[in-house]
Image (tube, coloured by chain):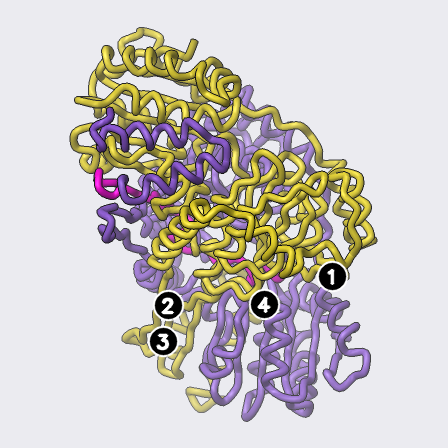
Chain colours: A purple, B yellow
């Protein structure tokens, strides 16, 4: 039974706050185990990677076979069907085209005082992408992480993907190939994160690590943060659908279930002012769910976290959506653009009934790595910006320093930083012929 | 004695790597103490803030006096001299003008398949700025944190600044006033961070917290991260000066000392192909240093971390600079623009001998909150972007879904996510008259 709320309930606020505060993730404390793995990789390098891969992935490697050779990649990717290859290419091309538009530009101008100011963007030199092994080894995630890095101009792009028992996902290798990845290592877990952050004899360190992973990978990313940059630590996924008008209840039910089938901790929420529509959608969910291959996962998610909220009107729906700040927001209403304008916090918005969220997971073009757990209030999805950094630039002319330097001298004095002031005063003295 | 290196030394690489790896900060482990303060504020709210402020700041408050009243702010800021007020206004205006140029624009386009794609930027709703008390209570930091938030369009802007023994810095209040801050609370430490992240009876929570602080504040920011966004955790400051040609050794020495006087952990580095210039600058540092009010701090920084590197040429200097990825990079050479083009990693660049780094700390316009400890390899200084987030937007026409949907269905199948595929297939079936 999903959670049923109505803004007409007298205790709605308490119930809604309870729903918002629900913890959907058990954070297992693996910090100590991860710290010891990182330290082992830092001390013993490749030998540690070989040992840890034998232990965790039941796979015997040598330092020389940590990396996939060009021949292996060619042989594995040759196994991909033409249909899968075409689908992956279409996705890669659309993701590349979308992200190319994100490239920001530098700027430079000279102000009336004669100060030339501006900034420039430069890419991170080397980036590493973690790809989980087994069930959650998603080729789409390879594209979503690797393509923005390439578009940003990252020179060296590395992937680590574990291959437990030696089982390789050829689609992951093909996705890496399509995205232009330079090196692929068959290692995983905290040891892969440590190798990318600190380097070993055969793996040069990178400057930024992105990509999803289990609790060990997440803890390792947190621990190496500072040494390298990391992307967000993603929580369980969620979708919020606001619906009204002539909507197809089956479509909406499938969109909710597409979220629920990800993971028992995923959350699917429907908000509508139309109670009969809410009932019809719930009936469709219950009709379709048992037949899904991942019925068990989807049923757990729907039972524990599924939520249906009936509101007085769309304004109320938009206000509740802002408080949830969903990762994915589907607006299945007559005028979705207008409703989008009345919301402020969401990772990605899908407009209208013909835009199921699943199309955004694969082929629409925008990134599918998005802020979860209400963090869309203050953060954004993955983009080329994650692989670029801004350097501010300033050049004073003597006249500019004469015009604005005295104010800096004054402020430095008020902060008790005298060498700051003197570094400006000495130049001003020269200008005034006192130097 | 600062560290003296020359790229002609046979063991230069080892020595340089040693310099790079120097730890300049003792990370005291205050995590437990901080966790207990946060939990106290979450449980007891205002009462905890009153108790903790009495204990740590020796100041008796009531829930009603946690906030500075308009009258107090007016009375305190009236004490500021006209000269200080003018200097602060000049700084505020220049910082505002620079950051206004950073505002990014949204974009929307329709591609040949009929998919309308794009993104929009929206501000964080509420931001909180931490300002340290006592010696490091810098009005310039208030401007550098608060103005970008205001320019970004943040609706509600809060400051927490401790006032130990009730001592207020009127310039901090004036800076907050000039920047348009809405609420100022006289609380500090981990309790202030907890109050801004979780809220109390009188302080509503914010979505993002920025600003510098001591080990307790830094640990508290790390602990509340996820609940709210935070800015970077700044380490000790550093400057790297690359010099060649007709440079004034006294100016360069003062620029190095301006860095060294910040903090005994700060680092000042000079790289030059001109050995006589290196000697002249070091002599100037030694001449000026003893006379500085903060001589003790500057001497410790210069002795422990000061570094002079003599290189064969400017190319070598630029390559070393990239490995250091300095927070502040001063290029005091004949053609600083050309040299800037040969560097890739720095928080901020100061071009030419008339642009001392100190002018950037106060009045040039760019932000002075910059990445330290080599993190300019992968991160940027504070900007309006820190107070904005991007929402991606997609709208499929039926034709667009027909064109690209089948590829998504294929990829969903390869990832074993059948409801994902069905959410698209059901729509395609309707389009094909099968629905």
* Dot placed on the residue nearer the N-terminal end, 3 or 1: 3
Please report, as a chain letter, where disc 4 is located: A
**Residue depicted at x 23% and y 11%:** B276
* Callout 1 and callout 2 share a chain: yes
| Nearest the eye: A205 or B300 | B300
| Residue B122: mark in rendering | none
| Residue B115: mark in rendering | 3
Q: Quadrant of the C terminus of chain A?
A: top left
Looking at the rendering, the stretch of residues picked out in magenta corresponds to A373-400
Q: Is residue A227 left or right of residue B98?
A: right
- Whether residue B308 appears in magenta in the rendering, the answer is no
**Mark 1 vs mark 2, CA separation in Å:** 36 Å
Within 10 Å of disc 4 (Cα), the crowding (few <14, some 14-19, many 20+) is: many
Determine contact: label 3, label 2, CB under 8 Å: no
Give the residue number, with chain letter if any, for mark 1: B202
Q: Is residue A270 left or right of residue B139?
A: right
* Callout 3 and callout 1 share a chain: yes
**Mark 4 vs mark 3, CA separation in Å:** 22 Å
| Residue B106: mark in rendering | 2
């Amino acid at each position: 039974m999903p959670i049923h709320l109505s803004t007409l309930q007298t205790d709605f606020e308490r119930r809604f706050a309870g729903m918002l505060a629900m913890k959907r993730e058990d954070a297992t404390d693996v910090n100590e185990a991860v710290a010891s793995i990182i330290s082992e990789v830092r001390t013993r390098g490749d030998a540690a990677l070989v040992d840890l891969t034998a232990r965790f992935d039941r796979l015997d490697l040598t330092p020389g076979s940590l990396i996939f050779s060009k021949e292996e990649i060619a042989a594995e990717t040759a196994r991909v069907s033409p249909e899968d290859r075409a689908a992956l290419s279409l996705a890669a091309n659309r993701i590349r085209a979308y992200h190319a538009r994100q490239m920001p530009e530098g700027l430079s101008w000279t102000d009336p005082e004669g100060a030339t100011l501006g900034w420039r963007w430069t890419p991170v030199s080397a980036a590493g992408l973690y790809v989980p092994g087994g069930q959650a080894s998603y080729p789409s995630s390879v594209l979503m992480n690797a393509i923005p890095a390439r578009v940003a101009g990252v020179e060296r792009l590395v992937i680590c993907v574990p291959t437990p028992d030696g089982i390789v996902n050829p689609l992951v290798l093909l996705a890496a190939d399509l995205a232009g990845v330079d090196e692929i290592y068959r290692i995983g877990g905290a040891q892969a994160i440590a190798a990318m952050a600190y380097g070993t004899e055969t793996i040069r360190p990178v400057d930024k690590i992105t990509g999803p992973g289990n609790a060990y990978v997440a803890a390792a990313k947190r621990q190496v943060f500072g040494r390298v940059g990391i992307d967000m630590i993603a929580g369980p996924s969620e979708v919020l659908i606001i619906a009204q008008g002539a909507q197809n209840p089956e479509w909406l039910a499938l969109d909710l279930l597409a979220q629920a089938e990800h993971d028992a901790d995923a959350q699917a929420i429907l908000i509508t002012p139309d109670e009969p529509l809410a009932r019809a959608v719930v009936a469709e969910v219950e009709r379709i769910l048992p037949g899904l291959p991942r019925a068990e996962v989807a049923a757990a998610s729907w039972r524990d976290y599924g939520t249906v909220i009936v509101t007085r009107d769309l304004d109320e729906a938009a206000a509740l959506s802002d408080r949830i700040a969903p990762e994915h927001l589907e607006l299945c209403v007559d005028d979705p653009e207008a409703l989008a304008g009345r919301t402020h916090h969401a990772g990605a918005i899908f407009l209208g009934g013909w835009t199921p969220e699943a199309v955004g997971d694969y082929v629409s073009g925008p990134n599918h790595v998005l802020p979860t757990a209400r963090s869309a209030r203050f953060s954004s999805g993955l983009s080329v910006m994650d692989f670029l950094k801004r350097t501010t630039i300033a050049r004073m002319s003597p006249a500019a320093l004469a015009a604005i330097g005295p104010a800096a001298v004054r402020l430095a004095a008020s902060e008790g930083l005298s060498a700051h002031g003197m570094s400006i005063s000495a130049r001003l003295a020269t200008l005034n012929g006192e130097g």
